[in-house]
Image (cartoon, grey):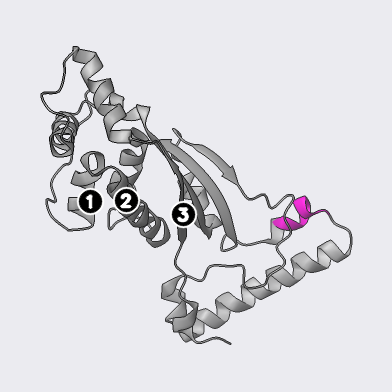
Amino acid sequence: MKRSKERVWRPKVKLLFVTPEAEELIEMAYRNCWQSKPKTTALKARRKFLEKCIKKGHLSPLEFASATFLIEASRVFTHQLVRHRLASYAQESQRYVEVKDPEYFVIPPSILENEEALKIFETAIRNSWEAYQKLLALKISKEDARYLLANACKSKIMVSMNFRSWRHFLKLRCETSAQWEIRETAMEILKILHRKAPGVFGDLYQKFILNKGQGELWTERD
């Protein structure tokens, strides 16, 4: 059995697509509302403008930009993720894809740190996976055999949201009260989106990554 430290699971997050020149496009959307023109095209000025608009709670222009990620995590995670309705999802199907690897499961850190709990967890996972394999050997379809698989089973899921929806997701899931796996995923997504559009995600980055400004971030008004 591998040592516990070597088995610590971290969700895998990969950016697949983000709207090119997203901040420029969002500024155009904002200014179209008021038929205003920027005094300068300087990047710093644009980002200050976006920050000001977001602070006022005017968020609908953020919907013109989007980002798509590929995430590998547990089914516990994906069940939480798909509760965010304003998104598009494409998830690895247990109906068609056989779980062949007995290690294709996530073990929570709290269980890894407890030897007795780890034994109980591994026994349950091993038993369910072995029973799953036995059903397949009996020509039971994958779509029925999968009923034995635990929520700890890993899954790959693609998710696409516009920037307004990503802000909502990050505001909820970066909080310390969020479940550990979705929080780690949200924090990684925030770091990536901040690099791509700091004018849009700067306040969230300040609060959750830099631990500055713990107050209310914004109140939507549209």
Question: What crowding class fits label 2: few (fewer than 14 Cα within 10 Å), some (14-19), or many (20 or more)?
Answer: many
In front: 136, or 96?
96
Look at the picture and state if 157 lies above or below 101: above
Going 41% across and 55% down the picture, which residue do you hit?
182
> Would you say 84 lies left or right of 101 here?
left
Q: Residues within 10 Å of mark 1 (few under 14, many from 20)?
A: many
Disc ID at residue 14: 3
Q: Which residue is mark 1?
A: 205
Look at mark 2 in the image and give the residue it sits on: 190
Q: Residue 119 lies in what quarter of the image?
A: bottom right
Decide which of tag 3 and tag 1 comes sooner along the chain.
3
Badge 3 element: strand
User: Which span is picked out in magenta?
Assistant: 141-146
Q: Amino acid at mark 3?
A: Lys
Pointer 2 with pointer 1, Cβ within 8 A: yes
Could you say which quadrant of the image residue 30 lies in?
Answer: top left
**Discs 3/1, front:** 3
* Membership of 19 in magenta stretch: no
Task: Please state which amino acid type lies under the numbered disc 2.
Answer: Leu
Mark 2 or 1, nearer chain start: 2
Question: Residue 218: x, y in percent?
Answer: 18, 36
Q: Is residue 222 visible?
A: no
Decide: marks 3, 2 in contact (CB < 8 A)? no
Farthest top residue in view: 35
- Of the pair 64 and 99, the residue shown nearer to us: 64
Report the residue that reaches farthest toward the right.
138
Front residue of this view, candidates 83 and 19: 19
Q: Quadrant of residue 54?
A: top left
| Distance from the alpha carbon under mark 3 to that under mark 1 | 18 Å
Q: Residue at x 76, y 57 (%)?
A: 145
